[in-house]
Image (tube, rainbow, N blue to C red):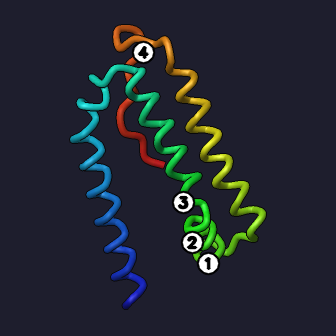
Amino acid sequence: NAIAQTLRQVAAQAELAVAHAVAAAPIWQSTPPAERAQCLLRAADLLESRMPLLLGLIVREAGKSLPNAIGEVREAVDFLRYYAGEIEGYSNDTHRPLGPVVC
């Protein structure tokens, strides 16, 4: 069955993504918070610079309206910038990343 095969492929991709995240976690944990904040800010900038491409994907693949798609990208950018600001002034001695989280 094609659906079952697709689900197995998706599960395998998810397992691989988690394995890569677990392998990279120690590197991220040892990265100073200011550098982690800069990564989040770069991610926000990339999302904004690629908004037209993202909007097309969100509308086509998720069936969202254009205003909803714009709202989703803006919300993601806002979260990235918010958490980049929150981590400023933290220290690896007091605030360690949780590690990979799957949702």
User: Which of marks 3 and 2 precedes in the sequence?
Assistant: 3
Residue 80: mark: none
- Mark 3 against mark 1, which lies toward the viewer? 3
Could you tell whether 79 is left or right of 28 in the image?
Answer: right
User: What type is the residue that disc 3 sits on?
Assistant: Arg
Quick check: 91 above or below 87? Answer: above
The relative height of residue 61 versus residue 95 in the rendered view (above or below) is below
In the picture, the disc for residue 60 is: 1
Residue sitting farthest toward the left: 23
Q: Taking 57 as reference, is 66 left or right? A: right
| Element at label 3 | loop
User: Disc 1 versus disc 4: distance between alpha carbons?
Assistant: 39 Å
Contact flag, marks 1 and 4 (Cβ < 8 Å): no
Verify CB contact (< 8 Å) between mark 1 and mark 2: yes
Question: Residue at point 30% right, 31% down?
Answer: 28
Residue under label 2 = 57
Crowding at mark 2 (Cα within 10 Å: few <14, some 14-19, many 20+):
some
* Residue bearing the label numbered 3: 50
Please say if the residues under marks 4 and 2 sit with CB atoms less than 8 Å apart.
Answer: no
Whole-percent x and y of residue 17? 31, 55
In primary-sequence order, the first of circles 4 and 2 is: 2
Height in image: 85 above or below 39?
Answer: above
x, y percentage for residue 55?
63, 67
| Callout in the foreground (4, 3) | 3
Quarter of the image for residue 57 reads bottom right
